[in-house]
Amino acid sequence: MNSLQFNLNRDLMSKHSICKEIEQFMLQNQVSDSKRFKIITCTLEAIANIFDHTKPPVDVMIVICHCDSHKVTIDILDDSIHHALKQPTSCPPAPSSSGRGLWIINNWMDSVRSQKTVAGTHLQLTLAV
């Protein structure tokens, strides 16, 4: 299994495109174009949601991308208070102020799991390759 880890904060996210790093990592692991698109989109959406919607705001998180011959797993760890994610049953309408990103994540990934940890919250996204 190959892994790539980011230790992110708000300042680093505004100055650095982790999208390119994840893309390169996926290319090195022969992940198809369509799977790379889904993984990158869902990872960036999850990171943005954590930075934008947690109370109190999260300043630092760890993102670890794991890749083997069968699946890609994205682990996102932060120090936020864990809240159970309400899974949308349908795509929210375009004028809706929120929910579309979570709907995309849940429909594009094979598995979405959120759990409480000693330090905060662990979000795990998995997609077969």
Image (cartoon, rainbow, N blue to C red):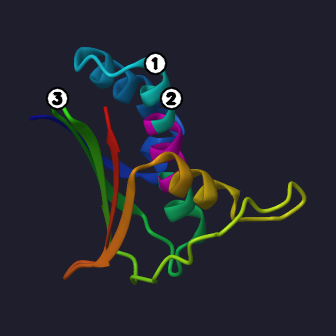
Q: Principal SS element in the magenta part?
A: helix
> Can you identify the residue that label 2 sits on?
37
Residue 121 image-quadrant placement: bottom left
How far apart are the alpha carbons under marks 3 and 1? 15 Å
The x, y position of residue 53, in whole percent, is 59, 70
Tell me which amino acid carries mark 3: Ser
Distance from disc 2 to disc 3, alpha carbons, whole Å, reads 18 Å
- Quadrant containing the C terminus in the rendered view: top left
Q: Please tell me how crowded label 1 is: few (under 14), some (14-19), or many (20+) other residues with Cα within 10 Å.
A: few
Residue ID at (50%, 81%): 56
**Residue 49 relative to residue 40: left or right:** right
CB-based contact (under 8 Å), mark 2 and mark 1: yes
Q: Which residue is mark 3?
A: 69
Give, as a three-letter code, the residue at label 2.
Phe
The residue indicated by pointer 1 is 33
Figure quadrant of the N terminus: top left
| Horizontal and vertical percent position of residue 46 | 49, 55
